[in-house]
Image (cartoon, rainbow, N blue to C red):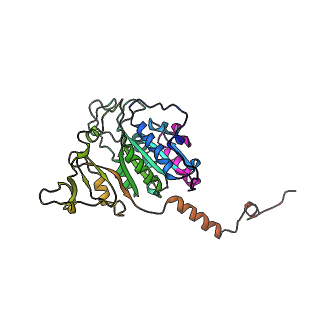
Amino acid sequence: MTENNIKLTPKDFKSNQEVRWCPGCGDHAILSAIQRALPELGYNKEQFAFISGIGCSSRFPYYMDTYGIHGIHGRASAIASGTKVANPKLSVWQITGDGDAMAIGGNHFIHVVRRNIDINLILFNNEIYGLTKGQYSPTSKLGSVTKTSPFGSIDNPFHPGELVIGAQGKFFARSIDTNIKLNKEIFIEAAHHDGTSVVEILQNCVIYNDKTHAYITDKEHKADRQLVLKHGEPMIFGANNDKGIVFAGTKLKVVTIGEDGYTKDDILVHDAYEENPEIHLMLINMHYPDYPVALGVIRSVKCETYDQRVEKQIEEVKKQSDIKCVDDLLRSGSTWEVK
């Protein structure tokens, strides 16, 4: 990426379009966090491209003063993949929702992760179809009462992090829409990661699924129900910073520091760079009320990207080929003159 000599600000990334999300929608805070993160990357403004599919979140490219494509339902991963491979110097950001990515776009989602194409995939997870007025989505909780599940959903929901690990993903992070500071930090780290960076944002839809994440976001309890992970730091949380995560046999366990003989030295230290995904999968699958919900960068592992391999293969083929220009191509094989 080309370093930018001109100091950019969040205002430089705000378009002249009216932001038409509902008042109170979590999308506003996510937009703000991304606009604050981009100037810190040091790239030229023309090196950013935002790609979306269909859904409330997919209006995002209109609100960014960057290159952008508003694609079709479920196909943002395919469009973002092609954009990056064809333009490897672009910083490509895919904006998608839980329906757009996990349902009609589910096949594209797992393959962009598997291929490890160098894009930043931001998944807005409000556990509902908001744009089409409140149908249950692939991430809706079991038993969710919606317009299309009036007696409660009987589907087992997808957990995006599990899909990322199952597709051999190298980067997964999770956050909450209203935590702009944490989101900004995650977006910067995702952008610096080479490969597919998946960031799940637990986002609130105030109209059709209000307070779906309230069990971990309300001010009174959030300190005891959120574990914000930092690489190299112990997994300590709680209003008094007196709770932590340890191994108990083959499972994770919540303990209180100072009770039952547990000290800070017993608390697990987060290693986002560990190649073996087992501990990362355990952290992804921690659910309230048995555990706090893990936030922050959970997994960040280095691996050669698909686009790097494409470029390398092209260079190898060019070296071996006798065709060096269009004239060589036209005169290769059987040729004849027409008089």
Given the current orientation, which residue lies at the most extreme bottom position? 320
Given the current orientation, which residue lies at the most extreme left position? 260
Q: How many marks?
A: 0
Specify the quadrant that holds the C terminus: bottom right
Query: Which residue is at a point 53% across and 58% down the rendered structure image?
Result: 307
- Which quadrant holds residue 277? bottom left
Q: Is residue 23 left or right of residue 119?
A: left
Q: Is residue 204 left or right of residue 43?
A: left
Give the percent coordinates (x, y) of residue 78.
Answer: 51, 48
- Magenta span: 62-91
Give the percent coordinates (x, y) of residue 278.
Answer: 30, 60
With respect to residue 205, does 91 lie above or below?
below
Please tell me which residue lies in front, 40 or 31: 40
With respect to residue 139, does 323 lie above or below?
below
Asked if the magenta segment contains residue 326, the reply would be: no
Whether residue 154 is visible: no
- Which quadrant holds residue 322? bottom right
Give the percent coordinates (x, y) of residue 181.
Answer: 38, 46
Query: Which residue is at a point 43% across and 46% down the rendered structure image?
Result: 122
Whether residue 106 is visible: yes
Asked if the magenta segment contains residue 66, the reply would be: yes
